[in-house]
Amino acid sequence: AQSVSQHNHHVILSEAASLELGCNYSYGGTVNLFWYVQYPGQHLQLLLKYFSGDPLVKGIKGFEAEFIKSKFSFNLRKPSVQWSDTAEYFCAVKGNNAGNMLTFGGGTRLMVKP
Amino acid sequence: DTAVSQTPKYLVTQMGNDKSIKCEQNLGHDTMYWYKQDSKKFLKIMFSYNNKELIINETVPNRFSPKSPDKAHLNLHINSLELGDSAVYFCASSQRTGGPGAQYFGPGTRLLVL
C-alpha cells in the first residue's frame, strides 16, 4: 500500500522568507508525485507534478519540487514567499500499480505574515 | 470555462435524509473521483470510476453510492445521512485510466448534517 507523510503540519513564515515543505512517501514501485494547493475556502489546485525525467520540477507561482528517489522524498520549495501563498499544501502520490488512486498526505498549513 | 463543477456548493440537511451531489467535467477525461475532506483537512479517496470499472475505498459506508449517467458526470448519492458525514466533498477527474495524469478538482460541496 502507498502512504504519504507530511511532517510539517503548520508553518509560519514572514514574507520573503524561503520555504521548504517536506513530503515522504512509502511505495515499492514507480510513482507519480504531485503537490496541490488549497487556498482558504477554495478547491485544490495542481501546483506541480513529477512523472519521469528531470527530478527537479518547476510549477506555477514560483514553486518547485525535487524528487529524491533514494530518500522517497518530494519536497516543495519556494525561494521567497508572499502573503498570498497562505494556504494548505498537499503532497500526493500515485503508484503505477495503484490503479487511479491518489493518496494524499495530511497537508501543511502555511501562514505567511505580511 | 469551469473544468470540474459541482452542485450544490453548500448543503445543510437533517440526519436520516437522502441527498445527492452532482459533478460534471468538461475536460473530456475518462475517469472521475469523489473525495471526502474532513474538518482536519484530511483528504480521503472514496471512489474512482470510469465507464468500465468502479473502485471503491473499502472504508466507505455503503450508504454512499456513485452514479454516472455518462462519461462527463459522476453524482454522489448519500442515504440515511449521519452527523459524521459532515465534510467537504470534492469531485475530481483525470485523463487516462491507469495513466499518470494529474487529477483536477471541483470547487467542493460543503455538507452539514444537523
Image (cartoon, coloured by chain):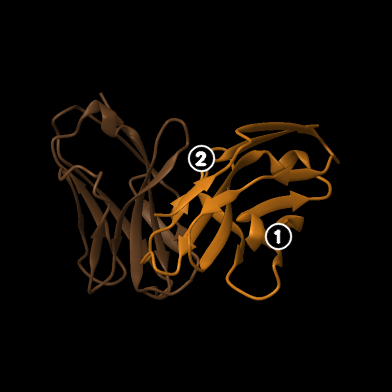
Quick check: A20 left or right of A36? right
The hue used for chain A is orange
The hue used for chain B is brown
- Per the image, label 1 sits on a secondary structure element best described as strand
Residue picked out by circle 1: A66
Residue at horizontal 22 percent and vertical 64 percent from the top: B68
| Residue A34 x %, y % | 57, 59
Residue at horizontal 50 percent and vertical 66 percent from the top: B102
Q: Is residue B12 above or below residue A35?
A: above
- Per the image, label 2 sits on a secondary structure element best described as loop
| Residue B62 x %, y % | 15, 45
Quick check: A102 left or right of B54? right
Quick check: A78 left or right of B77? right
Local crowd size for mark 2, using a 10 Å CA cut-off: few (<14), some (14–19), many (≥20): many
The amino acid marked with disc number 1 is Glu
Q: Is residue B72 above or below residue A102?
A: below
The amino acid marked with disc number 2 is Gly
Q: Which mark is residue A106?
A: 2
Calculate the distance from the C-alpha at mark 2 to the C-alpha at mark 1. 19 Å
